[in-house]
Image (spheres, rainbow, N blue to C red):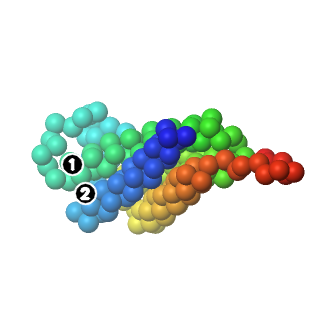
Amino acid sequence: MDRLRLVTHLAVAMVFLTIVIGGLVRAYQAGMGCGPDWPTCNGQVVPRNLLVLEVFLEYTHRVVAALAGLTVALAAYYTLKSLGPRSPATRFALVALLLLIVQVIVGMVLVRLHLEPFVGFSHLVLASLVLISSTLAAVYARIGAPQATPGHATG
């Protein structure tokens, strides 16, 4: 159970960090720091011009988002494996993963449409929903699987 709690809490932290860095990207108007390329940055896996603030911020946002995606996927896997498909933790973790997949697609569209405001708004709303779902998964994972009481079945 310790690994489950660690991964679910790490997923929450990584999603939060992604949102914070996304806020910096927006505040510094760095959303096009990697150009219209996605998933590459200015046509490269690792851009050569990382010392340019806008490139650094957008690239960092993408890298941290990828790591957040990995932790959200791991959280979904571990909740499913440890608590089963009917657990609230598993359900919230799977919702977070599904929302994150949509979030990635919206992020790509945002870059390709050169930061169209409604798409940017949708990107932020989805990020918030991923954070909420991940947080609920972590809370329910901390509580654990329901315990059987004498005379009552669980499940």
Q: Position of residue 33 (x, y in %)?
A: 24, 51
Q: Which residue is mark 2?
A: 30
In the rendering, at what x and y percent does residue 59 appear?
27, 45
Where, by quadrant of the figure, is residue 21 drawn? Answer: bottom left
Q: Identify whether 119 is placed above or below 44.
A: below
At numbered mark 1, what does the secondary structure look like: helix, strand or loop? helix
Q: Is residue 120 left or right of residue 82?
A: left
Who is closer to the viewer here, 147 or 94?
Answer: 147
How many residues crowd around disc 2 within 10 Å: few (fewer than 14), some, or many (20 or more)?
A: many
Q: Position of residue 123 (x, y in %)?
A: 45, 59
Task: Check disc 2 and report its element: helix, strand or loop.
Answer: loop
The answer to whether residue 43 shows anywhere in this view is: yes
Snapshot quadrant of residue 22: bottom left
Residue 145's spot in the image, x, y percent? 66, 47
Instruction: Inspect this view and state whether residue 69 appears.
Output: no
Quadrant of image for the N terminus: top right
User: What amino acid is labelled 1 in the image?
Assistant: Val
> Looking at the image, which is closer to me, 92 or 128?
92
Residue drawn at (39%, 57%), measured in percent from left and top?
Answer: 16
**What amino acid does circle 2 point to?**
Ala
149 horizontally vs 133: left or right: right
Q: Residue lying farthest right?
A: 151
> Is residue 34 or residue 53 the one in the foreground?
53
Circle on res. 55: 1
Q: Residue at x 39, y 41 (%)?
A: 66
Q: Neighbour class for label 1 at 10 Å: few (<14), some, many (≥20)?
A: many
Q: Nearer the viewer, residue 51 or 86?
A: 86
Q: Residue furthest left?
A: 51
Residue at position x 77%, y 48% from top? 148
Residue 80, placed above or below residue 92? above
Mark 1 and mark 2 lie on one chain; the one further toward the N terminus is 2
The answer to whether marks 1 and 2 mark residues whose Cβ atoms lie closer than 8 Å is yes
